[in-house]
Amino acid sequence: MTRGWIVPAIFVVCGAAVATGLGIGGSLLIAGAVLLVFVLIAGMNSPLMFPKPIGALEAQRRSAADGRPVVYWRPGCQFCQRLRIRLGRGARQVYWVDIWRDPEGAAVVRAVNDGNETVPTVFVAGRPHTNPDPEWVREQLRRA
C-alpha cells in the first residue's frame, strides 16, 4: 500500500468499526449511513480525488511549452483538496505532481519552502506560490 492510501484506509476501517457497533445494537439504517459517510470522506482523502499525477520533470517540460500551472500536492492534504475542489473542471488543465510518488517533486517543493514539504505549491511561469488562493490559480488558468 502506498502512503497515499493510508489515510483513506484508516477512514474505511474506522467507519466499518463504528457501523458494526451500531449494527450489532440494531441500528442498521444508521450504521449504513455512518459507513457511507466514512467511505465518502475516505474518497475525498484518496488519490482518486485528483487527476492522474505526472512526474515533476515532465510537468515542468509541459508547463514550459503551454504555460499551464504545475501543482505539487500530496494525498490527505486539506489545502490541496480545497484547491482541487475550487478549481472544479479547471483542475484537469493543471499538471498535478504527487510529491509522495515523485522524489524529484518532493525535492522541488523542499527547495522553495525552506526544506519543508509544504503543499500545495503552485508554479506559474516558473515562479513558486505556496498555498495560493484558489481564485488566483483559476485566473492563471484563464490566462494560460
Image (tube, rainbow, N blue to C red):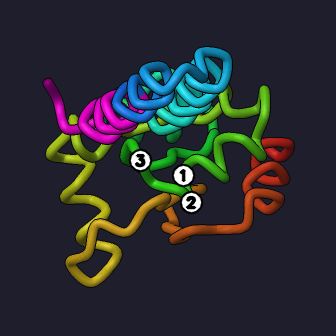
Q: Please give left or right for residue 113 compared with residue 127 in the image.
A: left
User: Which residue is identified by label 3?
Assistant: 76
Please give the label number shown on residue 80: 1
> Residue at horizontal 66%, vertical 52%?
82
Mark 3–mark 1 contact, CB under 8 Å?
A: no
Q: Which residues, given as a range, are shown in magenta? A: 1-15
**Figure quadrant of the N terminus:** top left
Sort mark 3 into few (<14), some (14-19) or many (20+) by Cα contacts within 10 Å. Answer: some
Residue 26 lies within the magenta run: no
Q: Is residue 98 above or below residue 40?
A: below
Percent coordinates x, y for residue 24 in the rendering: 42, 21
Which is in the foreground here, disc 2 or disc 3? 3
Residue 6 lies within the magenta run: yes
Disc 3 residue type?
A: Gly
User: Which residue is identified by label 2?
Assistant: 79
Mark 2–mark 1 contact, CB under 8 Å?
A: yes
SS state under label 2: helix
> Residue at horizontal 37%, vertical 47%?
74
In space, the residues marked 2 and 3 are separated at their CA atoms by 9 Å
Residue 4: name its quadrant.
top left
Percent coordinates x, y for residue 69 in the rendering: 60, 46
Disc 1 residue type?
A: Cys
